[in-house]
């Protein structure tokens, strides 16, 4: 018997922005597929037309392009199992609804919303199941002639799955092990609605997974209660042999307190929960995104991979290829994973350090230009080399290093009070003369000459270097002083020193 090829899918609904929890689900599917040489299918679940939001589908696709999660087939990617948009598969679903009705595994229900509400008011915790279905208006309780008359008159109906009570339903979950459910607790779920001639999630996914030969269904914990019904549907169709393996991922939890991570948590604590910035077409509200908040996609991927999975070693920083090699669904946690946004910032800092100076300079260039400054790629790379270890986000490089591009026009009051003494002006004048005399303005040359001068004069190293920093930077920040002056060059260094001497006196 040949081993079945791994085929997994990610199937979002175009009802708004993609939550970061959904991104993690897609990532785990991607890692699993790549590790096993399999395929990742992208489907769109748009059977609920009332919840459709314009622009959501393209937003989801753009999110994955930015993150580097690549699909093998599906909506916008093509493939042999299409169409991949559920709203374009109506006729396929109708065929399988008929199979269930003809085999007695499903039935038509004509109950109106008002009748259902009345029954809920009459019976506490009412559930449409084996114990109540014969008291309702459906093709099991009504005479055949009445059913025909209702259909002929165009009455709306739903098709419900007929769950037989007293069966043991086994869900073999890769993460959670064997879960056994008594079918008696399950309700007769709606599979199809005649009003829009579209199936519900339950039927559409089972049919699609079967026809697209999906081998593993990796999805969020919120779908775990649906798994027994899906097992029963596979049985009803006689598809047990091709039923996929299930893996239900743990929830992403709030950074603090209890409950599932929400946009409200991000708004309150100042971090995004969507991959890209989202502009709500209805309300006009704008929600922040990881991309626009200046997170690097590699950092987001690495952080998300470790939310609910651990490779079993102490390694935290892993490229996508390394994640593919190490990923193991069986090592995913059953318990919820707390969203530590401060750790996310740490990952971003580490990935800034990992990237080449040229890459970071390329990202930093538009920030510099936005401040009206023109600088060469070579100069930016030198600045980045000195400063990238001091920031968590690329945009922070401007505040940290703006003195490399713009000479100070005023001087920090506290630093002046602390570092600029009565004789600082004269000593800076002496230092300026010394620096002007140097033919070699390299870091090493300045360092040697200035240290010898300070020692020969009996000056304090701190008093000289602190005042020198104030003249070039305007405040008490920045890397080693000769790293700054060497990069600024002799002419700019001397001009700044002279200005500070004039202004500060």
Image: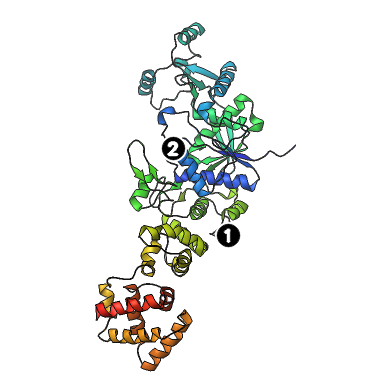
Q: Quadrant of the N terminus?
A: top right
Q: Position of residue 58 (x, y in %)?
A: 47, 39
**Is residue 191 visible to the viewer in this orientation of the structure?**
no
Residue at 45%, 21% in the rendered image: 196
Q: Nearer the viewer, residue 406 or 228?
A: 406
Q: In the displayed structure, would residue 436 be above or below residue 191?
A: below
- 333 relative to 476 in the view: left or right: right
The residue carrying mark 1 is 313
Residue pictured at 29% horizontal, 84% vertical? 424
Q: Does residue 356 lie above or below 485 as drawn?
A: above
Task: Indicate the quadrant where residue 452 lies.
Answer: bottom left
Is 505 placed above or below 4 here?
below
Residue 267: x and y, percent? 34, 49
Q: How is the image coloured?
A: rainbow
Q: Position of residue 220 (x, y in %)?
A: 50, 41
CA neighbours of label 1 inside 10 A, class few (<14), some (14 to 19), many (20+): few
Quadrant where the image shows the C terminus: bottom left
Image quadrant of residue 76? Answer: top right
Q: Position of residue 364 (x, y in %)?
A: 43, 60
Q: Earlier in the sequence, mark 1 or mark 2?
A: 2
Say left or right for 26 vs 487.
right
Q: Which mark is residue 126?
A: none
Q: Would residue 457 appear left or right of 37 to someone viewing this image?
A: left
Q: Distance of mark 1 from mark 2, alpha carbons?
A: 38 Å
Which dot, 1 or 2, sits closer to the camera?
2
Helix, strand or loop at label 1? It is loop
Residue 429 drawn above or below residue 289: below
| Residue wearing tag 2 | 56
Q: Is residue 415 visible?
A: yes
Q: Residue at x 27, y 77 (%)?
A: 416
Q: How many marks?
A: 2
């Amino acid at each position: 018997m040949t081993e079945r090829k791994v085929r997994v899918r990610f199937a979002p609904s175009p009802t708004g922005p993609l939550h970061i929890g959904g991104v993690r689900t897609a990532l785990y599917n991607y890692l699993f597929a790549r590790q096993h040489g399999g395929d990742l299918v992208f489907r769109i679940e748009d059977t609920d037309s009332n919840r459709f939001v314009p622009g959501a589908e393209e937003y989801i696709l753009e999110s994955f392009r930015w993150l580097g999660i690549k699909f093998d087939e599906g909506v916008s990617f093509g493939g042999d199992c299409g169409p991949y948009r559920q709203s374009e598969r109506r006729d396929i679903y109708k065929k399988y609804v008929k199979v269930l009705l003809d085999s007695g595994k499903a039935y038509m229900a004509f109950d109106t919303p008002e009748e259902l509400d009345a029954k809920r008011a009459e019976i506490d915790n009412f559930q449409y199941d084996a114990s109540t279905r014969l008291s309702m208006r459906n093709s099991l309780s009504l005479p055949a002639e009445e059913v025909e008359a209702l259909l002929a008159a165009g009455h709306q109906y739903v098709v419900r799955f007929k769950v037989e009570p007293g069966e043991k339903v086994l869900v073999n979950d890769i993460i959670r092990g064997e879960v056994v459910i008594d079918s008696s607790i399950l309700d007769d779920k709606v599979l199809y609605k005649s009003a829009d001639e579209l199936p519900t999630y339950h039927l559409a996914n089972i049919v699609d997974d079967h026809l697209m030969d999906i081998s593993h269904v990796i999805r969020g914990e919120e779908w775990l209660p649906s798994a027994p019904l899906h097992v029963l549907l596979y049985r009803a169709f006689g598809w047990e042999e091709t039923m996929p393996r299930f893996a239900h991922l743990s929830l992403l939890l709030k950074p603090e307190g209890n409950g599932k991570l929400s946009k409200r948590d991000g708004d309150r604590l100042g971090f995004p929960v969507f991959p890209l910035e989202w502009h709500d077409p209805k309300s006009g509200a704008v929600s922040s995104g990881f991309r626009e908040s200046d997170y690097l996609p590699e950092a987001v991927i690495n952080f998300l991979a470790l939310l609910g999975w651990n490779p079993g070693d102490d390694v935290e920083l892993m490229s996508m290829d390394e994640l593919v090699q190490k990923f193991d669904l069986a090592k995913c946690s059953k318990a919820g994973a707390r969203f530590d946004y401060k750790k996310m910032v740490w990952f971003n800092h580490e990935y800034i350090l990992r990237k080449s100076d040229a890459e970071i300079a390329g990202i930093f260039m538009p920030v510099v230009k936005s401040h009206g400054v023109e600088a060469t790629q070579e100069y930016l790379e030198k600045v980045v080399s000195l400063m990238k270890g001091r920031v968590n986000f690329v945009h922070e490089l401007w505040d940290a290093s703006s003195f490399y591009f713009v000479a100070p026009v005023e001087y920090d009051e506290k630093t002046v009070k602390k570092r600029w003494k009565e004789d600082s002006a004269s000593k800076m004048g002496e230092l300026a003369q010394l620096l002007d005399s140097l033919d070699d303005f390299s870091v090493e040359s300045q360092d040697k000459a200035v240290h010898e001068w300070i020692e020969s004069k009996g000056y304090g190293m701190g008093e000289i270097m602190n005042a020198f920093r104030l003249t070039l930077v305007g405040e008490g920040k920045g890397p080693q002083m000769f790293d700054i002056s060497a990069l600024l060059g002799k002419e700019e260094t001397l001009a700044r020193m002279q200005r500070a001497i004039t202004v500060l006196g």
